[in-house]
Amino acid sequence: MPSFKFAHNNLSVSNLEKSLAFYKEAFGLEEVRRKEGSDFTLVFLGDHGQTPHQLELTWNWDRKEIYDLGDAFHLALSTTDMKAAYALHKKMGCVCFENHKMGIYFVLDPDKYWIEVVPDRANPDTVYLDWKPEEGCIEY
């Protein structure tokens, strides 16, 4: 079998500028490349080279309403400072769910995609929220 590695995830967005502003403010993601089509724009966001993974935002110009997302999809980003991230996201008003047992939370982007925020457990300097995962809970 050939080997595979992740390249990017894609989210279809209804307002490209609003989505770009959200991902920059909420997660510090920056545009790394853009492709303009005849009726769409693709923008790839990166995390300043911390990982090779990218988030592709697809904007179909004629689409005005948000997409029907179902209930089984989300992205996850990790951080070494859960307290600062949580404070930023609370200030932005985008925290939509807190899981105190697992020590994680979710935010909603402008198109109602759920973004999970998890602590970087591999980094010994990670700052956790006051509600750390309970004994026996799933850890990422």
Image: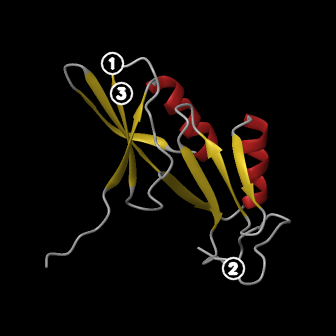
Position of residue 82 relative to residue 64, above or below, is below
- Please identify, in this view, whether the residue under mark 1 or under mark 2 is nearer the observer: 1
Which is nearer the eye, 18 or 107? 107
Label 1 sits on a secondary structure element that is loop
Q: What residue type is labelled 2?
A: Pro
* Pointer 2 residue: 124
Q: Position of residue 96 (x, y in %)?
A: 70, 44
Q: Which residue: 19% across, 19% down?
A: 38
Q: Which residue: 77% across, 67% down?
A: 128
- Residue sitting at the far left: 1
User: Mark 3 near mark 2, Cβ–Cβ under 8 Å?
Assistant: no
Q: In this view, does 53 lie to the left or right of 79?
A: left
Q: Which amino acid does label 1 sit on?
A: Trp
The Cα atoms of the two marked residues, 3 and 2, are separated by 39 Å
Q: How crowded is mark 3: few (under 14 residues within 10 Å), some or many (20 or more)?
A: many
* Pointer 1 residue: 61
**Image quarter of the C terminus:** bottom right
* Pointer 3 residue: 59
